[in-house]
Structure formats: C-alpha cells, structure tokens
Image: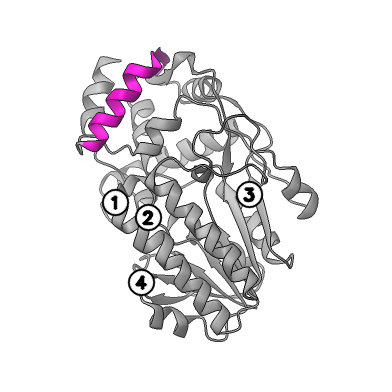
Amino acid sequence: MKVLVTGGSGYFGELLCLQLLERGHEVLNLDVNKNLDEDTRITFIEADIRDYDRIAQSCTGVDVVYHNVAQVPLAKDRHLFETVNKNGTENILKAALEKGVQRLVYTSSSAVFGIPQKNPVFESTQPTPMEAYGKAKYDGELLCREYSEKGLDVSIVRPRTILGHGRLGIFQILFEWVFTGKNIPVLNGGNNIYQFVHAEDLGNACILASERPGFNIYNCGAEEFGSMKDMLQSLCRHANTGSMVKSLPMWPVVIGMKITSSLGMSPLGAYHAMMYGRSMYFDISKATTELGWNPRYSNEEMIIETYDWYVSNRDRVLTNTSGSHHRKKLRQGVLKIVSRLL
C-alpha cells in the first residue's frame, strides 16, 4: 500500500516509517524538516500541516495515513498547540476524506486524561485534559469522531509516555544526570505507578489499528510496569555511576516546577509538573484482544535500552541542537542548579 506518515522525521514517526517499509509498503514522510540520515526508500514531502492545499495534494493516491504531527508539551506554546495539534489535525482529516484515503490512524496522547481519578484508565474513561497540550490533543480526538461520521475510517491510538532507543527530550536530562553520577529525584517516595510504552510496540499497535476497519480507540502501554522509584533504581543500578534515587516532598517541588516553567527557567512543561509524582496506567486489554497486540518491552527494559543508546551516542547528541524536541538535547536551565543540590 501507499502510506503517508505525518511527522515522519520525528522520533516516533521515523521509527514508524521504518516499520512500514519492513512490511513492504510505499512510504511517504510529510514533515517540515528532513532527517539527514533518512532512509532513501522513503519519499520526503516538505510541508507544514497547517497548509491545507499542500496537505491535500500529499494525500492524493494514498491508502492509509498515520497522523503523528504534534507540538509536544516541551514546546509550551498555546498558539502552536491550537494551530498545529488541533487545526493541523482537521486539515489532514479533511484532506484524507476529500482524496478518498481508506484509513487514518491518529496518534493521540494520555494527556487527554489529565490527572485520572482512578487507575487503570480505560478507553471508555471520560477524557478530562487539564493543560493546553492535552486539550489540543483531545480536540483532535473529537475531530476524528466528527470525520468518522462523515465517512472517513478512523482509529485513535493513545500511547503512554514513549521510550526506546533514540528518545531524548526530557529523558536526555535524566540520562545525562545518571551518566555523570548525579542523584535522581522522585516525589513522595516515588511509589506512584507509572506506565511507559516502547516506540516499537506503539508502532506495531498503530499498524494493527490501521488494519481493523471501523472507528476505534485503543489505549497502549507496557504490560509489565511498576513504580517510578523501582524503574529509576533499576536504571541507576544498571548504569553503576553512583547515581541514587532521592525522594523529595511533592507539593513544594510541583509548585517550584510550575513557577520556573512559566518563567521560562526550566524546560519542563505543565504536564510534567502535573504528572511526575502521580500514578497513571492504562488497561490495554482492548488492544491485545481486538488487535492481537502484544507489547514486548517492560518499563525496566525500555528505560535501560534507551539509556544505553544515549551513552553510545552521547557525543553526537551533545553537539546536536536541531530536530524535534524528542530528538535533541535540552537546555537544563534551573534544573542544572537543582542537580547540584540533590
């Protein structure tokens, strides 16, 4: 089939493109930037998701669209959340319907649930986004429902926090702290249960969702997971650099995270302050039952794999300042001071 991946130059989008190539599909990558080392078998289309005419042109003759373009929480830009995450999603939905695309898979976010009232979170749990990024992603979900009623075959995949080799962003800061032997903070003992998902597992879920007709929503996360403290302690033991997990009181830290983020002193966004010390995990039984999806990686396996990739590629990472937020190092800002106090 001919498939279009929006955001195919991003961290997850690139991996999804490669998985689709392995399945024998003709793959188009629609993005504003091209990776210098992009696989030559992928056709790159330089386009902004906000440019409807260009998007419609790119959907011509396409069988399946995998829509991943989004401004992530690290962007901290309400205008971009609105124009890219919401309006851009409507552009691709409208174009797909107009051009006769057979299926569209929308990669949403667990941020649509804000702080869940109870866990596990099911597909039927009512979304209650509590910050701008989550609200924009949920607006995208509502648009998917609207266009499914107009005749477009759509599925929504909601991932938990994504990990896997090459994942950077805020994890680059974590891995650099561990690599240099700094202590790693958790909140209120770090006993909050937190689920991740490996990018390869997520890619498989998106592809399986594209093969099942009809409007559907699937929550995707690891099958094996535990507390934030346990996962980070496993990482510290594996790294063996002297890093240890240190507990801090939740509310003073959360208030400090919010203030420094709003003042531009920290790379962290509102969602990070809201969720780092809280529990959140999905029930994934619908995806495993209906799609035959079987996530391979546990929390511990994926954090260690991602850290090992970082160590092997650290010199290159530290000199790279381009690309999406999840593919490059971040300025630590006030976090550099915090690391010296732990």
Left or right, residue 125 beside residue 136: right
Q: Nearer the viewer, residue 120 or 284?
A: 120
Disc 4 residue type (three-letter): Asp
Alpha carbons under labels 4 and 2: distance apart: 12 Å
Check whether the beta carbons of the residues at disc 2 and disc 1 lie within 8 A of each other: yes
Q: Secondary structure at mark 1?
A: loop
Q: Is residue 203 above or below residue 45?
A: above
Q: Nearer the viewer, residue 169 or 308?
A: 169
**Residue at (74%, 68%) from the top-left corner?**
213
Left or right, residue 179 beside residue 62: left
- Mark 1 vs mark 3, foreground winner is 1
The residue labelled by disc 1 is: 77
- Residue 300 in the magenta stretch? The answer is no
Disc 1 residue type (three-letter): Asp
Q: Position of residue 25 (x, y in %)?
A: 63, 74
Alpha carbons under labels 1 and 3: distance apart: 29 Å
Disc 3 residue type (three-letter): Asp
Q: Earlier in the sequence, mark 2 or mark 1?
A: 2
Disc 2 residue type (three-letter): Gln
**Residue at (24%, 37%) from the top-left corner?**
262
The residue labelled by disc 2 is: 71
Q: Position of residue 167 (x, y in %)?
A: 44, 46
The part of the chain drawn in magenta is 243-262
Q: Determine which of the numbered discs, if any, sits on residue 201 in the image.
A: 3
